Amino acid sequence: MDISSIITQKHYKAKDLEVPPRTIHHWKNEGLLFDEHLNVEKNKMMKFSLSEYFWIRIIQKCRDFGMSINQIKDVKFNIISKVRSYDDLLEEKHKEIIKNVRESLKDESEQNIQKQIANTLKYLKYVDLENEKERNHFQEVLEAVLFHRKPSGILIYNEGKIETDIYIENEEIVSQFTMKKFTKNHFYISFDSIFVELGLSDHFKQSELLSKDEISSIKYIREVIKSDKSKSLNINLKNSSIKSIRIKLNEPKGRKEIEEYKRRFGNNLNYTVNMHKNNKPNLFDFHYTRSFDTE
């Protein structure tokens, strides 16, 4: 079972949250919940996913701290703004990936093309902006927390207006910017305390969320996306796991860059050679393939 499925399955009732149903309905009507539960009839029991459990706990802690409904709305809006800001960074890469999939499968049916696009973008957290209203932005935050499995939480500042930061510990990036977040007066809600409450205190080590191969492949995909040498990528799946990733490289600008590709990618580098009339080779379509163990 993948992270998204674990987070979205609705297992919890109001009594599991130890919050009166009337209170949760009030928060729903005030627009505090990310999932609007539009299909729930009045006086019917609502069920909640893991991400909603976390968010309702955060609302509780904010209320215990003395925050008003409007201030919590500001926290929610800030989280939505943070998540949307990440969308812009990946949108151009996604367009290129979709274009490449369509070109490589131009003789296939639209159904197969759409399936391959979905599979390719599954690990890249692709966001269909046309379905913005259906998004649960906090779910996306929790997915990132479960992927990284590091101490995490929400920092809330109230210096004239409510500001919010999402914190996930990163040992590789302990910057002045990170430290500055903690030197300002703030209210910190730890996700780890909620994991402990749920009996998931070892959530950093849970193999059922992501296998080592899945983690390895996702990290690799992120590296490819960040690389200025990468033009596009295709992901091949086997039994719902990544079998291989084919990365198309930007065309080299000269012999020196070709030699750099050869040194960097070794035997994994492939390219097409055409001979000109003057018997000089023309090299193009540079790409390489990374395989993963799917057994």
Image: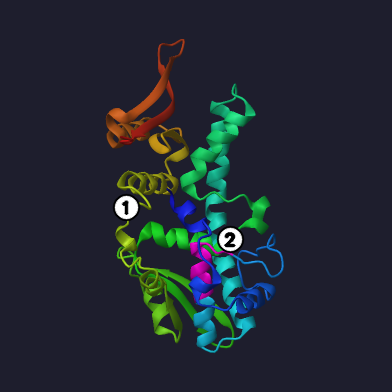
How far apart are the alpha carbons under marks 1 and 2? 25 Å
Disc 1 target residue = 207
Residue 100 in view of the camera:
no
Kindly check if marks 1 and 2 are in contact, taking CB atoms under 8 A apart as contact.
no
Span shown in magenta: 47-57
- Relative placement, left or right, of 107 versus 11 is right
Position in image of residue 13 (x %, y %): 54, 68
Position in image of residue 272 (x %, y %): 42, 21
- Relative placement, left or right, of 46 versus 245 is right
Disc 2 target residue = 136
Label whose residue precedes the other's in the sequence (1 or 2): 2
Residue at 34% x, 65% y is 150
Position in image of residue 79 (x %, y %): 55, 69
Indicate whether residue 209 is drawn in magenta.
Answer: no
Residue at 52% x, 80% y is 60
Task: Inspect the image, locate mark 1, and give the three-letter code of the amino acid beneath it.
Answer: Ser
Question: Image quadrant of residue 258?
Answer: top left
Task: Inspect the image, locate mark 2, and give the three-letter code of the amino acid beneath it.
Answer: Asn
Image quarter hosting the C terminus: top left
Element under disc 2: loop
Q: In this view, does 261 lie above or below 228?
A: above
Q: How many labels does the image show?
A: 2
Indicate whether residue 53 is drawn in magenta.
Answer: yes
Q: Nearer the viewer, residue 293 or 159?
A: 293
Question: Crowdedness of circle 2 by 10 Å Cα count: few (<14), some, many (20+)?
Answer: some
Question: Crowdedness of circle 1 by 10 Å Cα count: few (<14), some, many (20+)?
Answer: few
Residue at 28% x, 31% y is 266
Element under disc 1: loop
Position in image of residue 246 (x %, y %): 42, 33
Q: In this view, does 145 lie above or below 181?
A: above
